[in-house]
Image: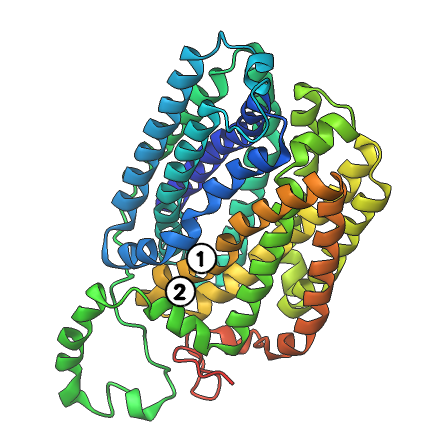
């Protein structure tokens, strides 16, 4: 784990801390503007909508540009956007929550529209950040270190974004509304500067190496064609945006994993989009208690990330993924049925977040090994477009379900949806390749560089 990887790791941790503060502060800000679950869920919907609209172009951009500059520049843009929100919250800090909430039924408060716009803009920049990050990690670490690197990334992100960040954000919000937004803007700036200090050149533009045991593609087999192969690959820098989505759709295992991730994100967002009301009204927590609960929920994510390498090496990726997709909906159903106090909800959420981190490390490491280098940004963002693009749908559904059937109903529906999907996907998980098949030098019998699905 050399200098460049440590810079990327530090940048991820710092920006995640600011994101965690924003994660708590933004719903709290929305709750001062309205008590309508549908309008509060709209913050999540608008913040995640860019994954439906901008993820594929951002992935293509990540494949054809310098990932360091793209990631750093996008984070500077995010910092500026959060700073705008901080200024606006300062200008309107004198307006009481009662004045905002006292508007007539059906009228949308003007300030929450501004929150929607800023959340959307931050999300657009985030698609570029994630696309660039997915291409950088495999170029900065050896293939056999991917679980270790992704596990550390996951542990740091959970610790900063969901364990330390939310309590910090809620505390800063309680002291002064603009503080968590200024803090997040500062973390984006510091993270961008660290990323821009990375020296290593990306290898994403190089064509994917053909299987070492494939005679039809061996350089020794047809040396006359080797010089012509490089110019022929140059147009890949300006290839179609949909190439990543097409490649993903042809891979039988990765497309199922992407589908599972989409359902999981839809269900999770459905439950969490009104969680601030669940915490304040059902669990009777204040802003500080809400932030502490969010932080406690992240403990499982940190633990799961730290244990991910051990679990995957000793149990196998398929066993880890199968266990997590069955255990998570059980925890969500238990929150809906028995979640009457903060301790119970926190314990069940620890289980859920631990499973999420194990899933992330196992599936991300697999994808980074299987996807050709020049397609990493597009395939990665194609998967994120499906997975995270489901979040705005989940947020809208969560607001509607909570408004019509109560604050526990989204958790019940989320658990049932995830359980049914997991049971349906179990046969497809048998396609999980062995460790030998994931090696870069795997032969043609196990080559997945050009997948063909059924």
Q: Residue at x 85, y 45 (%)?
A: 337
Q: Residue at x 51, y 71 (%)?
A: 255
Q: Which percent across, then down, holds residue 215?
A: 32, 92
Viewer-nearest residue: 124 or 10 = 124
Q: Is residue 302 in view from this perspective?
A: no
Q: Which percent across, then down, holds residue 111?
A: 45, 23
| Vertical order, 231 against 139 (above or below) | below
Q: Residue at x 17, y 74 (%)?
A: 230
According to the picture, the residue beneath numbered tag 1 turns out to be: 385
| Vertical order, 282 against 233 (above or below) | above
Q: Nearer the viewer, mark 2 or mark 1?
A: 1
Q: Residue at x 68, y 39 (%)?
A: 403
Q: Is residue 331 in view from this perspective?
A: yes
Q: Residues within 10 Å of mark 1 (few under 14, many from 20)?
A: many
Indicate left or right for 188 with 393 as reference: left
Local SS, label 2: helix
Viewer-nearest residue: 109 or 251 = 109
Please tell me how many numbered marks the rendered image carries.
Answer: 2
> What distance separates the C-alpha of mark 2 from that of mark 1?
10 Å
Q: Residues within 10 Å of mark 2 (few under 14, many from 20)?
A: many
State which tag comes first along the sequence, 2 or 1.
2
Quadrant for residue 98, please give it. top right
Local SS, label 1: helix
According to the picture, the residue beneath numbered tag 2 turns out to be: 379
Please identify the residue farthest to the top as the structure is shown.
94
């Amino acid at each position: 784990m050399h200098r460049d990887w440590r810079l990327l790791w530090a940048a991820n941790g710092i920006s995640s801390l600011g994101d965690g503060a924003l994660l708590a502060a933004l719903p709290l800000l929305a709750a001062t503007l309205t008590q309508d679950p549908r309008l509060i869920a709209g913050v999540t919907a608008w913040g995640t909508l860019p994954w439906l609209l901008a993820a594929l172009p951002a992935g293509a951009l990540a494949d054809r540009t310098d990932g360091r500059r793209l990631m750093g520049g996008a984070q500077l843009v995010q910092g500026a956007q959060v700073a705008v929100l901080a200024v606006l919250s300062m200008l309107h800090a004198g307006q009481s929550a009662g004045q905002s909430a006292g508007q007539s039924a059906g009228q949308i408060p003007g300030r929450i529209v501004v929150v929607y716009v800023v959340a959307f803009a931050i999300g657009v920049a985030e698609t570029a950040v994630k696309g660039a990050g997915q291409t950088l990690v495999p170029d900065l670490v050896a293939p056999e270190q991917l679980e270790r690197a992704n596990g550390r990334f996951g542990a740091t992100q959970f610790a900063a974004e969901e364990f330390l960040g939310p309590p910090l954000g809620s505390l800063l919000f309680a002291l002064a509304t603009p503080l968590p937004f200024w803090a997040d803007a500062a973390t984006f700036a510091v993270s961008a500067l660290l990323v821009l200090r990375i020296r290593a050149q990306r290898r994403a533009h190089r064509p994917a190496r053909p299987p070492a045991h494939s005679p039809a593609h061996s350089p020794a087999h047809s040396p006359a064609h080797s010089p012509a192969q490089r110019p022929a690959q140059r147009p890949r820098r300006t290839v179609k945006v949909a190439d990543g989505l097409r490649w993903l759709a042809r891979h039988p295992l990765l497309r199922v994993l992407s589908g599972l991730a989409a359902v999981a994100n839809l269900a999770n967002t459905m439950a969490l989009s009104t969680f601030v009301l669940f915490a304040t009204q059902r669990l009777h927590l204040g802003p500080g208690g809400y932030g502490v609960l969010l932080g406690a929920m992240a403990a499982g994510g940190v633990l799961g990330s730290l244990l991910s390498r051990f679990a995957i090496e000793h149990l196998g990726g398929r066993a880890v993924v199968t266990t997590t997709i069955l255990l998570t909906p059980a925890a969500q159903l238990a929150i809906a049925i028995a979640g009457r106090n903060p301790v119970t909800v926190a314990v069940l959420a620890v289980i859920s977040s631990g499973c999420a981190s194990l899933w992330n490390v196992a599936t991300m490491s697999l994808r980074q090994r299987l996807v050709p280098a020049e397609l990493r940004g597009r395939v990665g963002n194609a998967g994120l477009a499906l997975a995270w693009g489901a979040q705005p749908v989940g947020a809208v559904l969560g607001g509607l379900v909570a408004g019509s059937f109560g604050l526990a109903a989204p958790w019940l529906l989320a658990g049932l949806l995830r359980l049914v999907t997991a049971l349906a996907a179990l046969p497809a998980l048998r396609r999980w390749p062995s460790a030998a098949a994931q090696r870069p030098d795997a032969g043609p019998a196990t080559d997945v560089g050009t997948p063909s699905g059924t």
